[in-house]
Image (cartoon, coloured by chain):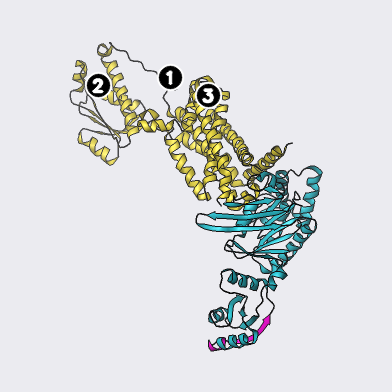
Amino acid sequence: MVQAVEAVELTRRFGDFVAVDRVSFTVARGEVFGFLGPNGAGKTTTIKMLTGLLAPSSGTARVAGHDVVTDPRSVRQQLGYMSQLFSLYSDLTVEENIRLFAGLYGVTGKRYRERRDWVLEMAGLQEYRDRLTGELALGHKQRLALGCAVLHQPPILFLDEPTSGVDPISRRSFWELIYQLAREGTTVLVSTHYMDEAEYCYRLALMHRGRLIALDRPGALRRRVTVPILEVEVDDAARAVEVLAGVPGVLEAAMFGRRVHAMVEEESSGRKEVAERLAGAGLSVSAIRPVAPSLEDVFVALVRRSSGEGSW
Amino acid sequence: MSGAGLRIRSMVRKEFRQLLRDPRTRMMIFVAPLIQLVMFGYAVNTDIRNTATVVVDLDRTAESRALVDAFGASGYFEIVQRSLRSSDIARALDRGDAVVGIEIPHGFSRDLALGKAAVQIVVDGSNSSIATVAQGYAARIVQRFAAERVPHWAAGVDLRTRAWYNPNLESRVYNVPAVIGVLVLMMSLLLTALAVVRERELGTLDQLMVSPLSPAEFVAAKTLPVAFIGLVDLFLITAVAVFWFDIPMRGSLLALLPAALLYILAGLSFGLLISSVSKTQQEAFMAMFLFLLPAIILSGFFYPIRSMPLPFQWLTVLNPVRHFLEIVRAVFLKGEGIGGLWVQYLAIGLFALVAIRAAIWRLPRTIGGS
């Protein structure tokens, strides 16, 4: 069976800046495939190349079996795309937007009415169909945008940070929709910088400075972190990170919300060292406990490893 | 319906909705051109009337008074000051109290009888167009006066000039048809120059470009509604020109229509091109004015092309505004048909073709660059 998406050595340069650097991966049909990484890691550029919005500087990509460079028109009917920018027309009503995209994808007649009703129901907008899209709440807008992106029931769906700026509850229900689509056979490629969202993906591509630094299931990625991680509750986390930088036995320290996660070589000696150093700097530590690595820890560890600082 | 037809129809419907839904855009499309036409029709008037004139009559005879009366009665000159000192002319012109000074020297009536009378006319040349016109009027008044008074002197030559197509030489008859050309261009540029760049800023352009809509279909969909609106504007403006300003429409609308279509196409495809090379709406706006102003100046709207330096005259050959103004003026005032204007048609058509090809070619690169 043909892979849904296949990228080989995909590269994009802007002048001297390499936004995406020799990225290769394949995505199987029906998979929910995530791109995880901070802003500027190359997630959006990768998705733009896969959707034909941006020409690769080198390398190739095939989507649904068609080459994105030589055969972009065959690719387009096969994919749905939703970007981080809300990209429906604010000065059109809900139904006018649906009708426009239906027309662009050749969804007409009975099928149009079915799909329109499906989108309105999925987005919870049955009573707002004649409302201007610009007047909707952000959560509604996002669901409508997703609805318009899958109006023509594309086998492959690209979502570029679809939930940025949305509250956690809307995000959760948005992900339920993504899962529903995946269950119905849609391949979903989604980029995010929310770690909790990344956990929902079947497989994750971790991106950093244009490079793919790891690609695996979330659980397998976590198992790659073999050193203990200490979660430190401290009054000034930012200063604690500064204090712990370069301390022998502490491999890495990073902010984690209002706490600090420190990777140490060995748990008991590390715990002692961390407590002493922080106390010595006049910081008040209320708890130090070992935790299982989160995806963020994985990310921090893998970035460190890929830049050649550690051997673990 | 084929896929392309359906896609274009969906996009055209969307464009019309967006253009006509916003009250400000509606105002800009239907009301602003009429206001501008009325403003141009009345204000852009190079006829001179009631020009402030100072008279120094040193002769003080029946003949000199009759000459002064001839000036006053012409309607072109209004005598605001009479004096017996030559220096008052300079003072009045300096202070801006008068634009024209007439000095009738001592012995005027005596010299008139001998056929060698002289009158001095001084004009404020700081506004050269008024000065030239006033000078011409003054010369004609003096000539006619002399011919009446000394028939035997002027009898040899009987000069009767007649201006064809515009017998009263009213500048409005010449200007208003040209205003039509400028307004239609402004409209088609305005509606398209922001069209692509706005969608790009909103992110909707990406959404369209991942769909099966091709760049050519996109350009067609952006073009058709604006062309339609441009034609509606053209009819509105032409109606006001003919019925309100009494501009004679000697030719046929059928000669004007294809020219207008080509011209609107030229304007909006250039607008689309501006839009697809601009990164922001402000940039597009600036670029539009950078094009619009020279296009109007080098069109023969205000200044005759023949009096421009040669390189600029060559430049005007590329200017669709120049060709369209020639067509509009010829159709309105001379009743010219398509046959006599094919060069202008061709020039506008070529400009439109090149601009639209460039816009379609440029569009995919616009997106790639973001």
Question: Which residue is label 1 attached to?
Answer: B164
Residue sitting at x 56%, y 70%: A308
What segment is highlighted magenta in the picture? A278-292
Look at label 1 and name its amino acid. Trp
Give the side of residue B156 with respect to residue B3, left or right. Answer: left
**SS for tag 2?**
helix
Depth order, front residue of A130/A13? A13
Q: What is the x, y in percent for residue B156?
A: 27, 10
Image coords of residue B34 (percent x, y)? 54, 37
Distance, label 1 to label 2, CA atoms, is: 34 Å
Q: Do the residues at discs 1 and 3 belong to one chain?
A: yes
- How far apart in space, not on screen, are marks 1 and 3 (Cα)? 15 Å
Q: Which residue is mark 3?
A: B249
Q: Position of residue B333 (x, y in %)?
A: 48, 23
Instruction: Give amino acid for label 3.
Output: Met
**As displayed, is residue B82 above or below residue A58?**
above
First in residue order: circle 1 vs circle 2: 2
Q: What chain letter is assigned to the residue under label 1? A: B
Disc 2 crowd, CA 10 A, few/some/many (<14, 14-19, 20+):
some
Q: Please state the chain letter of the residue tagged with numbered disc 3 in the rendered image.
A: B
Residue A277 seen by the camera: yes
| Residue type of the residue flagged with mark 2 | Glu
Return the disc, 2 or 3, that comes first in the chain's sequence.
Answer: 2
> Considering only vertical position in the picture, is A271 above or below B178?
below
In the picture, which chain is cyan?
A
Q: Nearer the viewer, residue A130 or A185?
A: A185
Image quadrant of residue B224? top right
The disc label shown at residue B63, or none: 2
**For residue B245, side relative to residue A203 (left or right):** left
What is chain B's hue in the picture? Answer: yellow
- The image quarter in which residue B234 lies: top right
Say few, some or many: other residues with alpha carbon within 10 Å of mark 3 (under 14 / 14 to 19 / 20 or more).
many
